Amino acid sequence: MNPYDFVPIDTQHPPQRRKPVWHNVLKNADAKAGKLYSGHLYVTITAETPLFIPDTETSMQDPNHPGEHIYNNAGTYIIPGTSLKGLLRSVVETLCNGCLKMLHLPVGYKIPPDFTGCQDNKNLCIACRLFGMMMPEMQRNAQVFLGKINIGDALANSEGFALHEPIYTIILEAPKPRHQAFYLDPDKRYIAGRKFYFHHHGKLNTEDNLIKIRNEPGKFRNQYIEPIDTGTQFDVRIDFTNLEADEFAALLLAITLKPDMRHKVGYGKPMGLGSIHMKLTELCFVDYATRYIAFRSGRGLSRHSTDELTNLVHDQMASFDEHVHAIWHRFYEQPALDQLHAIWEWRPDSMVVYSYPSRDWFDAHPQARIAETWNL
């Protein structure tokens, strides 16, 4: 079966854009809009499959030395905060009707007009209010909105850490949008949706060696890498400032998903790398209005530990804030979550083998859609 599928764009529910609450306010000027949420949370990330994010300083095509996973200046292996931010933003865009800012379109492909990237920093979709927006630098008077979420690098825990044996990847070529039956909707008007990769069951899809490129000595069509092994855990802190109820609910949903879902991150997703489990382990709120006037009794801080968070997530914050709960429940009932669940369900079907269709298959099935790749 093809290793990826698309979550369709819900054109009946375009992004709801509005003026964002800026970072420097202490309370919402609109009393009817409800309270604001600031603070930080900690997430533990567990590698459910081997994981690889390349260190750009090392080669992935040296037959004698595999490419290394990225690490920081202290020598600790990491998942960069930028990678996690891009991952969570794509999930929020998908599940909460954001614009298509994260989508890089092939030439000639179109998106529904209402879903084009936000252009006005006083009129933003939920994803741009959370993660920020910036117009192209070459545009005069470009507008900017600094995101209200800051994600640090996820640091690998030394306990239980292990590297996977070096592997040769399959040929990971660029997308082939020329096959419009995959990349366009059934009416061939717009793109098919947002692209996500399936989780793989069991053994990675690999090659036995580096595959030479004909007439280009020393160059290869695949890579030689040393991933981080299954079971390795990372810890990351996420800070958030002045989130409105829908933004706070969207952030929590993007992290927790459904209990039997896992995220995908990093390099080599088509071959089975990069399945991770994200779990909230601590949530701390900061009431800045109280913090600046109180010198005792916690100074506006309130914390929720792992056990409390498990219950809060299970009931979608019903016992914490009715407004957040109602919005979380609405997001949870959107068709997009079921569609993403079909791709990111964990554990994956052990009977399915994922691989790209061959050129001969495409030639023989020029109009076939992804659903027809079940038995390649």
Image (cartoon, rainbow, N blue to C red):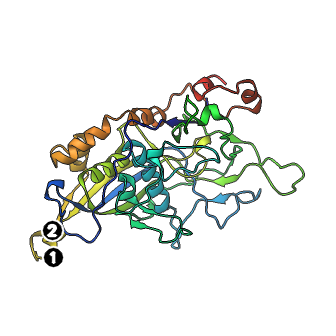
Which residue is label 1 attached to?
A: 292
Marks 1 and 2 in Cβ contact (< 8 Å): yes
Q: Is residue 17 left or right of residue 208?
A: left
Identify the residue at image location x=61%, y=59%.
Answer: 54
| Residue kind at label 1, given as amino acid type | Tyr
Label 2: state its secondary structure.
helix
**Distance in Å between CA atoms under marks 1 and 2:** 8 Å
Position of the C terminus, as image quadrant, is top right
Q: Which of the marked residues, 1 or 2, is nearer the chain's N terminus?
A: 1
Q: Is residue 4 visible?
A: yes
Residue 122 at x, y percent in the picture: 34, 62
Identify the residue at image location x=21%, y=44%.
Answer: 325
Position of the N terminus, as image quadrant, is top right
Label 1: state its secondary structure.
loop
Which residue is label 2 attached to?
A: 300
Out of 317 and 126, give the one closest to the viewer: 126
Q: Is residue 225 left or right of residue 84?
A: right
Up the image or down, 131 lies above or below 51; here it is below
Identify the residue at image location x=51%, y=71%.
Answer: 140
Out of 75 and 343, give the one closest to the viewer: 343
Q: Is residue 246 left or right of residue 318?
A: right
Identify the residue at image location x=68%, y=41%.
Answer: 176
| Residue kind at label 2, given as amino acid type | Gly
Up the image or down, 269 lies above or below 135; here it is above
Quarter of the image where one finds residue 43: bottom left
Residue 215 at x, y percent in the picture: 90, 52
Residue 252 at x, y percent in the picture: 31, 49
